[in-house]
Amino acid sequence: MTAPIEVSKGEAEAHPEDVLKGVGTQAIQGRSLGRIAWLRLKRDRAALGGAVVIALLILLAAFGPFFLQDPNAYHQDLIDPTMQRPKDGFLHSGISWEHWFGVEPTTGRDMLSRIVLGARISLIVAFLATLVSVTIGTVLGVVAGYFGGWVDTVISRAMDVFLAFPLLLFAIALVGVVPDDMLGLRGNGLRVGVLVFVIGFFSWPYIGRIVRGQTLSLREREFVDASRSLGAGHGHVLFKELLPNLLAPIIVYTTLLIPTNILFEAALSFLGVGVIPPMPSWGGMLSLAVPTYQNTPFFMIIPGLAIFVTVMAFNLLGDGLRDALDPRAR
Amino acid sequence: MGAVVMLVIVSMVTFGIFFQLPKLAGQTTDQLAASYVGKAPTAEAIADVKERLGLDDPLAVQYGRFVKGVFTGQDFSNGPSVEHCAAPCLGYSFRTNEPVLPTLLDRAPVTLSLAVGASLIWLVAGVSIGILSALRRGTVFDRMAMATALAGVSLPVYFTGLVSMAVFVYTFRLWPNGVAYSDFTENPGLWAWNLVLPWVTLAFLYAATYARLTRSQMLETLGEDYIRTARAKGLPERTVIGKHALRASLTPIVTIFGLDLGLLLGGAVLTEQTFSLPGLGSLSIHSILSGDLPMVMGVVLLATVFIVFASLIVDILYAVVDPRVRLG
């Protein structure tokens, strides 16, 4: 048995224990989709590994910069003045006890603290941009799928147009022409805001399409009819009935959108329209490595590996979540 | 029809964005004209340029003139002489004064070579690895292939490009003079040899995506009832896989392939930047960063033409691949 079917609001708030009385907590364990997914996910070592790496990265990005040395301090005593590269270390990396990841050619800035600060930028931009695109994509996708008709036509066409745009070019152009001072923001605060907006705004159709498709099939189901015949309005059906059922695909594609957005941010920084130097970013560090990598290959490998490990971790977790939450998976 | 509407929308949005954004950024048409004049702009020269390019006209008027130029050509009064730009006229670059269309046609072969070569590699490699993985699900091959594919989709192309250059160009010296684009018509062998690295680097990224997609599609199809029926009626496994399973699994691949190829033909921005290839992608980046509006318009329009065209071809290919689809 489960909880009594009808409980008026007053009762539930007044005596929650009474309501639950008689419900055997041990008797039968209902397995919700979330619980099944968790049981499956626990067995997926690759996905768990990804989750652990992500957790470590977040901790590092949040607290690392407080413990590490100044990422913008020059250490030119470590640089060979004729070759413009670190004097010692494996592959002229400048790796030492003081500088675990070596130092930058020419300036001698510490790579470890730059990578960690770069992680902060990368994760902040990717998370916020994903939030933007998931919000827009979910709302428009649900609305398009639920209402159908001309609403659906307009939104679907908009998605087609977005997908047909040379997005990278637009993103570069947009970031490139934003003034130095806007909406009370300036400098890197403004840059991060612009990056979040541009990336989020251009990647919503991917999740929008998926949500629309799921909504199309859900809206014909009995529980939606039931809710409507009980007199529920559009708002209730959309957000209380449909949305909870869309949660699984939304979670999966959110997890898979984050690495895409990390790569998007890195690409923009690589092309020179990311955060403003001397603030480090992974893509920016790679583009700095382009003119010097024949001399100092190590300088290019560090930021490349940082991008790779982070994106891979999110992809592993996303794949694991998809397998775990997919009711068709055996 | 839908294709034409798409082109019109994209061109309007592009025109609007690139025309309006510099203004929002606080740039006046005077400054725009000044950068067009170049060194030591005098007030008359600025006024002259503004007059000639019609920079102070309303947005709609400028867009109308642009569209008219595409269909009927356009005259530019260049001081005393009048320059005529023939029918598909995309205007002149703000920076170099070169006409836009010939510049685009000059750059297009590079991007075309890169995109077509890479797409052939990734299509063959990605799809066949995906099929093999699905058929040998759970084996060592499958695990290795999928691990590599996952790594492939997690590596940015500008990183793999730099690493492969560092290894093959600067360490093993397979290309002792570096990798530079050479024309196909002059020396096809050299053309292909010099493009091997960009092709493989770009194809690796896409092959990884395609292998993952093909595998999951194939596994889904193999679970369908009609596959069981086909097996039950005693068809040889080769026919079941080749004719029944493959066709159904390939449909979504064809769609994505069309979009990907169309997008790349408009400029493989990152790959071209990494390997310093003088294609449409590097042209577009350069034009955007230097505020060359007519050139940007040209590149974006051409890119959209490619994408729209590619999706048309995909629709036609659908009918070939999937017998359930009939062209109306």
Image (cartoon, rainbow, N blue to C red):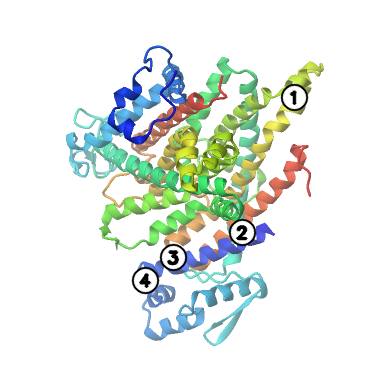
**First of labels 3, 2 by sequence position:** 2
Callout 4 touching callout 3 (CB < 8 Å): no
Tell me the kind of residue under disc 1.
Answer: Tyr
Viewer-nearest residue: B196 or A36: A36
Q: Residues within 10 Å of mark 3 (few under 14, many from 20)?
A: many
| Separation (CA) of disc 2 from disc 1 | 38 Å
Quadrant of the rendered image containing residue A178: bottom left
* Secondary structure beneath label 2: helix
| Separation (CA) of disc 3 from disc 2 | 25 Å
| Separation (CA) of disc 2 from disc 4 | 30 Å
Tell me the kind of residue under disc 4.
Answer: Gln
Q: Is residue A250 above or below residue A163?
A: above
Residue behind mark 1 = B226
Q: Residues within 10 Å of mark 2 (few under 14, many from 20)?
A: some
Chain under numbered label 1: B
Question: Is residue A282 rendered to the left or right of residue B139?
Answer: left
Q: Are marks 3 and 1 on the same chain?
A: yes
Q: Residue furthest top?
A: A27
Question: Is residue B231 rendered to the left or right of residue B98?
Answer: right
Residue behind mark 2 = B6
Residue behind mark 4 = B27
Which numbered tag is attached to residue B291? Answer: 3
**First of labels 2, 4 by sequence position:** 2
Tell me the kind of residue under disc 2.
Answer: Met
Counting from the top left corner in percent of width and height, residue B285 is at 47, 56
Mark in the foreground, 3 or 2: 2
Q: Is residue B21 above or below residue A50?
A: below
* Secondary structure beneath label 4: loop
Chain under numbered label 3: B
